[in-house]
Image: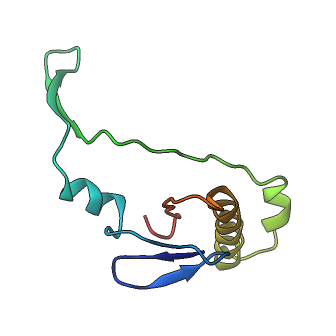
Amino acid sequence: MHLKKASGHARSIGSAMSVTYPYHSLEDFLTANMLTVDTQLDDGWGASFPVKGRKIEATVLFAGVTAFSARTADLDPTETLTFVNNFFCWITAEALRGRPGRAATSAET
């Protein structure tokens, strides 16, 4: 699969499916769309604070890598990042196989 950023760069993560998305980051998406939550709440001590955001429909995958510490103990930070990104690219490709979708990795945020 190739994930294409708005800049036109593609990243290959498996099969021949290609997904293009118009935003570079979640921040780009949020600033380009109207807020659905925009209010002031009381903090309980008489001061108010703003609550702003946008409701979105999303699926979030939290995944652990078995024996992560043992697998990465002898790796430098760049090698660890490569290990983690390869794992998440693989698991994302498996999750999206045959389905339209969008995935953001830690490197994009």
Q: Is residue 29 above or below residue 42?
A: below
Looking at the rendering, which quadrant does residue 71 occupy? bottom right
Residue at the far front: name it.
98
The residue at the point 49 percent across, 83 percent down is 10
| 70 over 54 or under it: above or below | below
Q: What percent of the width, then of the height, locates residue 58?
A: 45, 44
* Residue 15: % across, % down: 67, 75
Position of the C terminus by quadrant? bottom left
At which x and y percent is residue 2?
A: 55, 78
Residue found 80% across the figure and 66% down from its top: 73
Could you tell me which quadrant the N terminus lies in? bottom right
From the viewer's perspective, is residue 99 above or below residue 2?
Answer: above
Most distant residue in the bottom direction: 9
Which residue: 20% across, 37% down? 36
* 73 vs 10: above or below: above
Residue at the image point whose x is 30% and y is 38% from the top: 55
Query: What percent of the width, then of the height, locates residue 7?
Result: 34, 82
- Residue in front for this viewpoint, 106 or 43: 106
Left or right of residue 14, residue 101 in this image? left
Q: How many marks?
A: 0
Closer to the camera, 70 or 14? 14
As rendered, which of 66 and 76 lies closer to the eye?
66
For the rendered model, the colour scheme is rainbow
User: Left or right: 62 with respect to 37?
Assistant: right
